[in-house]
Amino acid sequence: MKSEEMLMLQALKLKKLNSKGYDGPDLVDQLVLQNGEFAKEKLRNICAFISPELFSEIDSLCGLLDLSKREFVEMALVDLVAKAHAVIEQTNATEGL
């Protein structure tokens, strides 16, 4: 591993710790497992059928990157929501509503 890669890894670990405040299993996943009422009151579930190939790829990536599927899907949705807002703003799609 190159020195730049090692520095990037350590910096990203620090960023993760500072943004989550905890470097263990995902806290939301833990709360859902321990307290189903928390999930019902504070969270919403999105279910969607996807192709087996896409599911397999996501499952492999989550294992490789040490992410839960919930974390992976939430990050993807946050990114897509930001992109959708940008496109709506760029195209003035809501003008006149």
Image: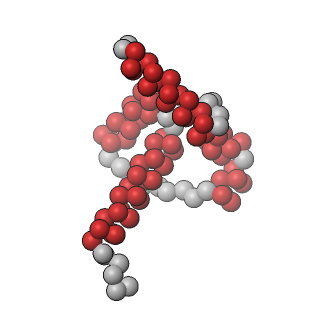
Look at the image and tell me in which quarter the N terminus lies: top left
Q: Position of residue 88 (x, y in %)?
A: 33, 69
Residue 45, picture quadrant: bottom right
Is residue 83 visible to the viewer in this orientation of the structure? yes
Q: Nearer the viewer, residue 46 or 24?
A: 24
Q: Position of residue 19 (x, y in %)?
A: 58, 40
For the point 60% across and 33% down, which residue is it? 17
Q: Is residue 15 above or below residue 5?
A: below
25 horizontally vs 77: left or right? right
Is residue 25 visible to the viewer in this orientation of the structure? no
Q: Is residue 46 above or below residue 68?
A: below
For the point 32% across and 46% down, which residue is it? 51
Q: Position of residue 20 (x, y in %)?
A: 61, 39
Q: Nearer the viewer, residue 64 or 19?
A: 19
For the point 46% across and 47% down, which residue is it? 75
**Farthest bottom residue?**
96
Residue 24, picture quadrant: top right
Q: Nearer the viewer, residue 48 or 84?
A: 84
Residue 34, picture quadrant: top right
Q: Position of residue 93 (x, y in %)?
A: 31, 75
> How many labels sit on residues?
0
Q: Is residue 82 above or below residue 70?
A: below
